[in-house]
Each structure stands twice: as C-alpha cells, then as structure tokens.
Image: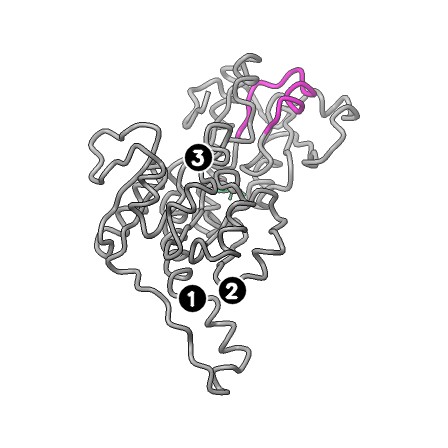
C-alpha cells in the first residue's frame, strides 16, 4: 500500500449511523458503502463485500459476523474508546487491525461523571421537574438531599477516565478509593481489592471501567447492598457493567439511594422502571457528545485510516 496514489477508490464500510462530519470526511477520502447496524449480512452486495476497511462506534462495534461478511477486510476504525462490541480475538485471527479513540474524550466523559454525581446526589433533575410543574410556586419545598463534599468516592476502574474523575473530585471528596482487578502502579488513591469491601467503604461508586465479558454484571445485587441505602452509583462506562435488574430492584426497594446513568444495557431503550424513578438521573449516552470532542474523535479515526491507507503506523491501535 505504500505510495498509494489515491485512496478514493478504496472501498470501505460505514457500519451504523456515523457522526455526520465523520461520514462526510470519509466520503471525500474513500469509496464508502453504508451498512445498517441491523443489516442482513448474508445479503450484502458484491461491491460492499470488497470493502477493505470498516468504520463503526462503541454501541455497534464489529462482531465476527460483519468481519466474515467482508473477506478483504484489513482495518476497523472505531469512533469510540470502548471496543467491547468488537470481536477483537476474531479480528486478530483474521489479521485485521483495530483502532479506537482514546484520550481525546477523557475530559468530557470525566466532566459528565462529575456532573451526574452532583445532579444525582443533589436531586437537580427532580427539583428542575418540580419547579417546572409549578409545585414550588404552590408551596412545595424541595426534599432534603445529601451533601457531595466530604463523601467517600469509590472509582470502579482507575484507567484514563477513572483517574480524570478522581482528579476532579480530589478537592471535595472525603476520600477517593478505587477497585480494579489489580492495583494501579503509583495510584494516589486507596486500592480496595475486594469488591464488597470497596462498596462498603464508598458513599458513591462511579463506574469507569471498560465494558465487555470481564466486567459484565460486575456490580451485582451483593455489591449494591454493600453500597447501602445511603449510597449512590454513577455509570458513564457501559450499561453491561451493572446488573440492570438488580439495580432496578435496589432502587425500587430503597436499598440504595439513587443512580446517575449515562449508559444502559439495551440502548437506546431504558427500563420503564428507571424512567419512573425520581431518584434516578438519566442521560442518553452523551459522555463524549460535545462539539469539540466528537470532532477530535472523528479526526483521530480519519488519521488512523489515512495511516492505514498509506501503509504507515497506526496512531491508536487496539490490535
Ligand atoms: C460513544 C463511547 O461510543 O467512546 C466510547 O466508548 O461510549 C462514546 O464515546 C461515541 O460517542 C459514539 O457514539
């Protein structure tokens, strides 16, 4: 591929509905073929099956089936840092490269985690609804909530985003502790190896670990009970990390105090039970959804694809 005269003849697949700026930029660089996330992969036109690269994103990913439907596939560029929906082992077995978009979205996702923390513990969304409904004007007073400052903040997963969240909360937290499979070298926070001990020692758990089989259901009923009736949980990672049925039950039975959720098991479908709960703040997986970050993510996807097309080293390879 070195010295490729022109990439506009290279067929690539856009899988799922991409961010418009990225889609337009890809169309200028490559011969793009749009494939819907729920397409019948056995019925792809021959021109599509010639694709040598695929662009997707966090909640759609790239299962083995789409890779096997594209026999000439060499490269998967993800518009996301999470690659839990990509069958990475299958990609490796096929010799397919995979890139993601780390770092450029860390600050925005960490900002949202802190925003969700305050919105949830201080009842900001519920009180907004109360004012808009005219209840305050009718004499209703806001229910007392809990203080954020001084609380013990437990970070589940101390990766790039977890560390950015911790840094933001250092000035206000009573303590910052974390849980992960193993202790992080040079971490400035207390490591708690046992997940139940971690939950018991936290007033708020912020879920910042990656998604995928290794963390699926990591936050289960036992962990929620260990967090306790005055505890809160915030999730900006992946819905799969929390046992969603156990979360709904713990909230409904007041075994935890509240939740701030930006991610869910079956996006964009949110359990009706959560929608009905005033002690839950719900967001539409918007962690990285700022103008600045989405453009930076798109530019990183494009830079990786340009490097691949030119036979140069990839910027942010997963494999
Ligand atoms: C979305 C994310 O995937 O980066 C990730 O892993 O979950 C988010 O950034 C991205 O915004 C595309 O929808």
Tell me where the magenta segment starts and ends, as one range: 62-77
Position above or below: 148 against 12: below
Q: Nearer the viewer, residue 31 or 91?
A: 91
Question: Hey, which quadrant is residue 73 in on the image?
Answer: top right
Q: Nearer the viewer, residue 48 or 233?
A: 233
Q: Residue at x 50, y 87 (%)?
A: 138
Task: From the top left corner, tell me how far across and down residue 304 is, in percent.
Answer: 47, 28
Task: From the top left corner, tell me how far across and down residue 47 is, in percent.
Answer: 74, 23
Q: Are marks 2 and 1 in contact (CB under 8 Å)?
A: yes
Mark 2 surroundings: few (<14), some (14-19) or many (≥20) residues within 10 A: some
Q: Could you tell me which secondary element the residue under label 2 belongs to?
A: loop
Q: Are marks 3 and 1 in contact (CB under 8 Å)?
A: no
Position above or below: 63 against 203: above
Position above or below: 7 against 190: above
State how far apart marks 2 and 3 are (Cα): 28 Å
Q: Residue at x 37, y 43 (%)?
A: 106
Q: Are marks 2 and 3 in contact (CB under 8 Å)?
A: no
Is 57 placed left or right of 122 in the picture?
right
Q: In the rendered image, which residue does mark 3 sit on?
A: 210
Q: In the rendered image, which residue does mark 2 sit on?
A: 278
* Colouring chosen for the image of the structure: one colour
Task: From the top left corner, tell me how far across and down residue 290 is, in percent.
Answer: 46, 52
Beta carbon at label 2 within 8 Å of ligand 1:
no
Q: Confirm whether the magenta stretch covers residue 72.
A: yes
Q: Nearer the viewer, mark 3 or mark 1?
A: 1
Q: In the drawing, what numbered circle is on residue 123?
A: 1
Task: From the top left corner, tell me how far across and down residue 93 is, in percent.
Answer: 55, 12
């Amino acid at each position: 591929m070195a010295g490729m005269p022109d990439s506009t003849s290279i067929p690539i697949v856009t899988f799922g509905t991409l961010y418009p700026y990225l889609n337009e930029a890809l169309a200028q660089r490559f011969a793009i073929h749009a494939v819907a996330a729920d397409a019948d992969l056995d019925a792809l036109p021959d021109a599509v099956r010639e694709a040598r690269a695929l662009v997707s994103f966090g909640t759609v990913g790239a299962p083995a089936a789409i890779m096997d439907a594209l026999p000439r596939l060499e490269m998967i560029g993800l518009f996301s840092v999470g690659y839990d929906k990509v069958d990475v082992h299958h990609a490796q077995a096929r010799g397919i490269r995979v890139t993601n978009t780390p770092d450029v979205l860390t600050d925005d996702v960490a900002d949202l985690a802190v925003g969700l923390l305050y919105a949830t513990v201080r009842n900001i969304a519920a009180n907004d609804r109360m004012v808009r409904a005219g209840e305050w004007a009718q004499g209703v007073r806001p229910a007392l909530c809990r203080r954020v400052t001084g609380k013990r903040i437990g970070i589940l997963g101390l990766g790039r985003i977890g560390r950015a969240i911790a840094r933001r909360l250092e000035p206000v937290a009573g303590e910052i502790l974390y849980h992960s499979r193993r202790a992080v070298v040079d971490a400035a926070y207390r490591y708690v190896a046992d997940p139940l001990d971690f939950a018991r020692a936290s007033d708020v758990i912020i879920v910042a670990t990656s998604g995928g089989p290794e963390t699926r259901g990591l936050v289960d009923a036992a962990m929620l009970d260990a967090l306790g009736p005055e505890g809160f949980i915030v999730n900006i990672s992946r819905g799969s990390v929390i046992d969603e049925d156990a979360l709904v039950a713990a909230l409904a039975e007041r075994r935890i105090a509240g939740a701030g959720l930006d991610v869910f098991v079956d996006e964009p479908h949110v359990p009706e039970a959560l929608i009905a709960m005033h002690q839950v703040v719900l967001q539409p997986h918007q962690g990285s959804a700022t103008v600045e970050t989405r453009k930076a993510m798109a530019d990183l996807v494009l830079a990786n694809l340009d490097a691949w097309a030119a036979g140069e080293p990839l910027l942010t390879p997963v494999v």
